[in-house]
Each structure stands twice: as structure tokens, then as C-alpha cells.
Image (spheres, helix red, strand yellow):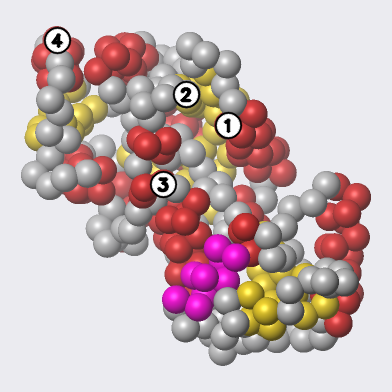
Amino acid sequence: MQAYLAETLKSIQQQSHALWELHIVDDHSEDDTMNIVRQFSEDERISYVTNTGNGIIPALQKAFAQCNGTMITRMDGDDLMPTHRLASMTHALARSGSKTMVTGKVKYFGESPVSEGYLKYEQWLNERIVQEDHWDWIYRECVVASPNWMMYKEALEAIGGFDELLYPEDYDLILRCYNHQFQIKGIHETTLLWREHPKRTSRNSQHYNQESFFALKIKRFLAFESQHKSLYLIGTMRKGKLAARCLLQENEAFQWFDRQQEGHRKKIYGQDIHDINLMPENKEAHALITVFPEDEERNVLESFLNNLGFEFGHNCWYL
């Protein structure tokens, strides 16, 4: 974003860790972006190229091909790096195994008050750092902010880099790391100042709407988790219907459960809706939960599922 790019680049130049290279990819901008970039190109650590494709995935591929360092991170042109981010991340990664992704806490900011939804996501991401349970929640949301990770270049290369990703590509990359059994090491400090503004791509592109996230997570879930198991879908609200549509598009059989009430629809999309209290015990099944009630009710639900042999993060996941 032209309006914020200079501030972003300054935050990188002001890092306490000075040994870095920055590769900027211009995705066919039509504003003053490149003039701003050229003002910073006197810094020999900064280079820039034009995207040979269109969009963020080919831009990431282009930037990755330019990288010479052993560790790689990424940044968006409207966010800010806290001064010690690179120092903290490189230190943490150097003390970790090769298949490690380092991340830290996030803090939203903006010229206007940050919406409740983004504040909840900020809190949720930061809770993953504290709880060290990223992979348990992998099918609910993207568990690492896209401009807030670092890993070894060689390790990223070994799992395909940014090639063959689907949108939303930030989530797909994290799903790929999950599938390749990377560990996530969390830093208990803020490593990304995440700018909220009306022109954010995630706000305006269909690549990042809820339907796109569900299509991707269901596709990857079916590919990554054990095949030929019974699948239970829990909940019939909006997320339940989204998940059901995605499963039907993938020709995946499932049983659909919800709390039955008098007058409750017995079928949705031609699928029978079963009373959750009649869900059978099946230790060979997987369950996807599309509701997220308040703590007390959620504890009851999880206890109920545990008694049926479902273990959160193992054969049972929130969507």
C-alpha cells in the first residue's frame, strides 16, 4: 500500500539485527509505490523486481527465488516490524530444529478503532503462543499471521516453497507445514504490528472470504487426515452449512448432527440431520465441530465427545 510503504520499510531498516536482505516484488502497481521503493534502494540490502505473474502467489515465488539467506521471513507493505523482531526470531530459530516455524504475538492498530472481530482474532492468535497448541486448532483458523513467521529457507524449499499453493495462500502454507510435521515455536513478545484499514486485501478480495477459507480447509482436511473413516459434522448454523456444501462438492460422505428441537428441519441439502444425543461411539471416526459456544456449554460438548472417544486435535477439530 503506497500510503504505508515508507513506514513499513523504515521499520525494517531500524531492526536491531542488521544482517538481512529485503526483496520487494511490485505487483504491477499503478500508484507511487515504485518511486517510494527507489528512495530506499540506496540501502544495498534492499532490491526490487516486478512480478512476472499477477497476484501474491507468483509474487512470493518471485521473491523466494531471489533470496540468498539461510533464514526467510515475509512482510506485507502496510504493517510494521517491532525493532527486535528479526533479532528475536533468528535467535529462536537458530536454537530450534530444521523443521521449525518461529512466530510471535500480534498487535492490531489503525487510524480508526480496530473492530471487535479483529481484536478477537488477535487475542486468539496470542493465546496459541501461550498455550503452545497451534496444531490442535489448525482447521479453525490460520494459526500463524501471514507476515509473522520465520523458517529455514532450505526447509521451506523442501516442502515446495510457495509453489502449488491455493488461495488463501497464507493459510495453505501453514496447512502445508502442519502436514509436513513442522513444529511451531512461539515467542512471547509482539513481533508484528498489524495495520487495520479499509483497503486491506483480506477485506476486499474474494480469495480471503469465509467461503474460500472453508473450501481450502475442507480440501486439505480430506487430503491430510486418515482416509476411509466415518466423518461426523456437528452443527447446522452458517459454518455447518458451509462445511456441508464443501464436503458435498468433494463427494465426501458424512453424518450430520445437531441438537434436535420440535419443528427442526430433518434435512438440509438433502442430508438427514440426526440428534447429537444419538451420536454413536466410534473410535475410528473423525468429527468436525462447526459451532463454538460459550465456555460452559463448550465444556459440556467436549466432555460429551470425549466420552464417545473423540480427542480434540487428534480425531476431532473445531472449524
- Residue 318 x/y as whole percent: 67, 59
- Give the magenta-colored segment's residue range: 241-249
User: Is residue 118 among what the camera can see?
Assistant: yes
The residue indicated by pointer 1 is: 118
Report the amino acid beneath label 3.
Answer: Tyr
The residue to which callout 4 is attached is 39
The percent position of residue 270, horizontal first and vertical second, equals 60, 82
Whole-angstrom CA distance, mark 4 to mark 3, is 32 Å
Q: Residue at x 86, y 82 (%)?
A: 278
Residue 286 as seen in the image, left or right of residue 199: right
Residue under the image location 50 percent in, 51 percent down: 210
The residue to which callout 2 is attached is: 196
Is disc 1 in contact with disc 2, using a CB cutoff of under 8 Å?
A: yes
- Name the residue nearer the viewer: 101 or 111: 111
Q: Earlier in the sequence, mark 4 or mark 1?
A: 4
Report the front residue among 36 and 255.
255
Name which residue lies at 41% across and 14% down.
Answer: 16
Q: CA distance from mark 2 to mark 4?
A: 25 Å
Q: Secondary structure at mark 1?
A: helix
Q: Are marks 4 and 3 in contact (CB under 8 Å)?
A: no
Cα–Cα span, label 3 and label 1: 14 Å
First in residue order: circle 3 vs circle 2: 2
Give the label, 4 or 1, closer to the camera.
Answer: 1
Residue 208, label in figure: 3
| Label 4 secondary element | helix
Label 2 or label 4, whichever comes before in sequence order? 4
Of pointers 1 and 2, the one earlier in the residue sequence: 1
